[in-house]
Image (cartoon, rainbow, N blue to C red):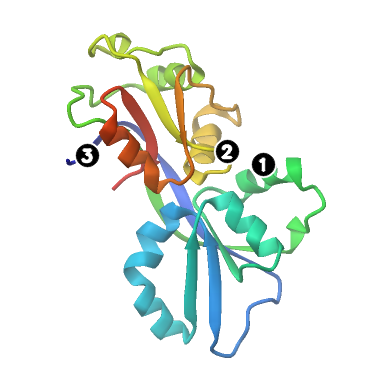
Amino acid sequence: MGMRTGLACRIASGALLALVSVLPAAAEDLTIQGSTTFNAGLLAPYRADIEAASGHRLAVIPNKSSLGLVALFEGRADLAMISTSLQSEVALLRQERPDLPFSQLRNFVVSRTRVAFAVHPDNPIRTADTGVIKKVLRGEIDNWRDLGGADLPLRVVIVREGGGVQLTIENALFRGERLKPRNPVYVVLGSEVVKAVVRDPGALGLAQLG
């Protein structure tokens, strides 16, 4: 079943991070962990080209941005993939791990993509202004009839804490305010958002465009 995307969009950054002076110069395996958004858009389609150009073999573990950073600090990854700003990820991680050497991180912006609010193919709603989106994500609107659609509960599909898309929306639209939708549906990975929306006519998914 195809998926259409609509509603308001914002820009999210895709970046690779490394700790100071940890990357090997000689060709060997490099482990990369983190954002599924970054992996799907860049590493998966261009992995062979990257390996050929860099001389390194890549072991890629897509999970989510925050897990990639933790793996980098703990020595389980040589590079971390994030799909939001480094500042956002550090602010979140600092709450639980203030002891980590954040000043040693080096950030390399690789690309930019758009955040999309995905809806079920049968949902006729394709546009909404920013004010309405904010009300949905604050839990002030929880039915599609308030957006001009069917009388159907509106459920927001979102990656659990630490996902890059979620952090981008919180910072771009809410100035750091946490999202509090009335009927959240939490998934583990960004790649699961669209799958959940396809199964639920009342879902609104926080995902990347495409």
Q: Secondary structure at mark 1?
A: helix
Q: Secondary structure at mark 3?
A: loop
Q: Quadrant of residue 114?
A: top left
Q: Are marks 2 and 3 in contact (CB under 8 Å)?
A: no
Quadrant (top left/top right/bottom left/bottom right) for the N terminus: top left
Q: CA distance from mark 3 to mark 1?
A: 31 Å
At a point 39% along the width and 85% down the height, the residue shown is 52
From the top left corner, tell me how far across and down residue 189 is, in percent.
46, 46
Q: Amino acid at mark 3?
A: Met
Q: In the image, which disc is placed on residue 92?
A: 1
Q: Are marks 2 and 1 in contact (CB under 8 Å)?
A: yes
Please, is residue 95 above or below residue 17 in the view? above
At a point 34% along the width and 36% down the height, the residue shown is 196
Please, is residue 94 above or below residue 68 in the view? above
Q: Secondary structure at mark 2?
A: loop
Q: Amino acid at mark 2?
A: Glu
Please, is residue 22 above or below residue 141 in the view? below
From where the camera sits, is residue 115 visible? no
Query: Would you say 78 lies left or right of 156 here?
Result: right
Q: Amino acid at mark 1?
A: Leu
Q: Earlier in the sequence, mark 2 or mark 1?
A: 1
At a point 78% along the width and 59% down the height, the residue shown is 101
Q: In the image, which disc is placed on residue 103?
A: none
Q: CA distance from mark 2 to mark 3?
A: 24 Å
Q: CA distance from mark 2 to mark 1?
A: 9 Å
Mark 2 residue crowding within 10 angstroms, few (<14) / some (14–19) / many (20+):
some
Q: Earlier in the sequence, mark 3 or mark 1?
A: 3
- Residue for badge 2: 161
- Residue for badge 3: 3
